[in-house]
Amino acid sequence: MNLPPEPSRHEAFFSACRSVLVRSALLFSTAGVALTLFLAPMMVREERGVMGSVGSSVMGSSDLDYSATGSINTPGTYTVRRSVLSQKPGGVCVIRDDGRQVGDC
């Protein structure tokens, strides 16, 4: 019977070391990814809380924009127009579907 040659002691040692290194690299990278996925959202929440309290106590009001979206109670369609030629910078003209114009038109 013709068997393949047995690896030398050095080859077997380096093969085992390589295997251990690959497994440990996979273990630590997986742990790093898991920590990142769990800790990053928690850190953002804590940072927002600290920023809000520091901003309100030091400056008198928070510099954070707490705007919210809402809905318009009036049914129907309308067109919103903004123009650089408007008298007021940032002025908005709202044109209703019946032709009424509201705002800076």
Image (cartoon, rainbow, N blue to C red):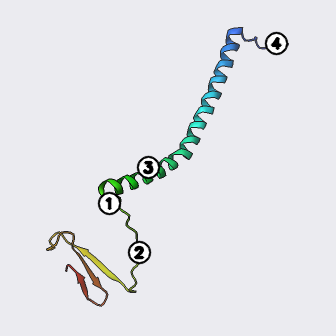
Sequence order check: which comes first, mark 3 or mark 4? 4
104 versus 63 height, above or below: below
The x and y percentages for residue 72 are 39, 80
Sequence order check: which comes first, mark 3 or mark 1? 3
Q: Secondary structure at mark 1?
A: loop
Left or right: 73 in relation to 4: left
Q: Which residue is mark 2?
A: 70
Any mark on residue 61, and which?
A: 1
The C terminus - image quarter: bottom left
In front: mark 4 or mark 2?
Answer: 2
Residue occupying the point 67% across, 18% down: 15
Quadrant of the rendered structure where residue 101 is? bottom left
30 versus 89 height, above or below: above
Sequence order check: which comes first, mark 4 or mark 2? 4
Answer yes or no: do the residues labelled 4 and 2 have beta carbons within 8 Å? no
What's the amino acid at mark 3? Glu
Residue occupying the point 16% across, 72% down: 88
Q: Which residue is mark 3?
A: 47
What's the amino acid at mark 2? Gly
Label 4 Cα crowd, 10 Å radius (few <14 / some 14-19 / many 20+): few
- Quote the CA–CA distance across marks 2 and 3: 27 Å
- Quote the CA–CA distance across marks 3 and 4: 68 Å
Which one is in front, 98 or 102? Answer: 102
In front: mark 4 or mark 1?
Answer: 1
- Quote the CA–CA distance across marks 4 and 2: 81 Å
Left or right: 52 in relation to 19: left
What's the amino acid at mark 4? Asn
Total labels: the figure holds: 4
The x and y percentages for residue 48 are 43, 53
Label 2 Cα crowd, 10 Å radius (few <14 / some 14-19 / many 20+): few
Q: Which residue is mark 4?
A: 2
